[in-house]
């Protein structure tokens, strides 16, 4: 069964460093997302991406964050200068469609656990 | 106001019994979708079941069923015949209206522990 993959599974970085989290969405999906989950808290939306551009972003997704689909398969989240509070599990998700067809179900990857020291 | 409320932070259930996880939501948009995800201790988010706001029937997927009460704005997940592997966090989520984009808003989750 197709699945979303993410690399790395864990990343430790120093405050102020740049990190790039990578995702390979399900191959025929068109909509891509990043969410994060700070330890013990609820999952929070960061950004959605469609047709090579951001379609929506949350307040969390400030200028330190960027997303890119550099080729036909990868979808990346870059944090330019990490802060301690960026420590979280980051989930990539993809969906075939948007809307109300029932095909807008978002399938999540296994997550990247980011620790900023 | 909370968009998605899960009032049960944790529950115990006996193996082979059914368990109901509560979820209430708040939206003024007539078009929305409701989702349940399972998060085991390993951390991944596993999609379980979907209910659209216009669906006439309650959704079912194997041992999972959704008790959708639109007037009450509730979408409770029922897990029948609980198994030890059902021990996990369970999140209710909503995609709210077409104008609001496609983001999911999650509840705080319910931790389920299945006892042998």
Image (spheres, helix red, strand yellow):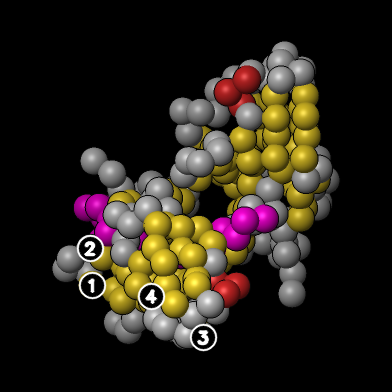
Q: Are marks 2 and 1 in contact (CB under 8 Å)?
A: yes
For the residue carrying disc 1, how many other residues have a C-alpha within 10 Å: few (<14), some (14-19), or many (20+)?
Answer: few
* Closer to the camera in the image, A84 or A48: A84
Spatial CA distance of label 4 from label 1 is 17 Å
Spatial CA distance of label 3 from label 2 is 24 Å
Residue that extends furthest to the front in the rendered view of this protein? B116
Which chain letter matches label 4? B
Whether labels 4 and 3 belong to a single chain: the reply is yes
Whether residue B45 is situated above or below residue A38 in the rendered picture:
below
Please state the extent of the stretch shown in magenta in the rendering.
Answer: B24-42
Whether labels 2 and 1 belong to a single chain: the reply is yes
Which chain letter matches label 1? B
Residue that extends furthest to the left in the rendered view of this protein? B71
Residue under label 3? B62
Spatial CA distance of label 1 from label 3 is 20 Å
Q: Are marks 1 and 3 in contact (CB under 8 Å)?
A: no
């Amino acid at each position: 069964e197709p699945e979303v993959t993410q690399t790395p599974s864990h990343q430790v970085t120093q405050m102020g460093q740049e990190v790039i989290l990578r995702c390979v969405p399900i191959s025929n999906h068109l909509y891509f997302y990043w969410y994060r989950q700070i330890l013990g808290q609820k999952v929070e939306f960061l950004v959605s991406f469609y047709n090579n551009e951001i379609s929506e972003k949350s307040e969390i997704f400030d200028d330190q964050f960027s997303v890119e689909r550099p080729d036909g398969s990868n979808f990346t989240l870059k944090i330019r200068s990490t802060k301690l509070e960026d420590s979280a599990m980051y989930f990539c998700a993809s969906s075939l469609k948007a809307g109300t067809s029932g095909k807008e179900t978002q399938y999540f990857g296994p997550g990247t656990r980011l620790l900023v020291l | 106001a909370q968009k998605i409320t899960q009032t049960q932070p944790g529950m115990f259930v006996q193996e082979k019994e059914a368990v109901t996880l509560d979820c209430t939501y708040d939206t003024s948009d007539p078009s929305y979708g409701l989702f349940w995800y399972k998060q085991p201790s390993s951390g991944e988010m596993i999609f379980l079941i979907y209910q659209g706001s216009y669906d006439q029937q309650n959704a079912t997927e194997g041992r999972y069923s959704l008790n959708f009460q639109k007037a009450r704005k509730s979408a409770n997940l029922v897990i029948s015949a609980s198994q030890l592997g059902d021990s996990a966090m369970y999140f209710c989520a909503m995609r709210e209206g077409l104008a609001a984009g496609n983001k999911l808003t999650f509840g705080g989750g319910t931790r389920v522990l299945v006892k042998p």
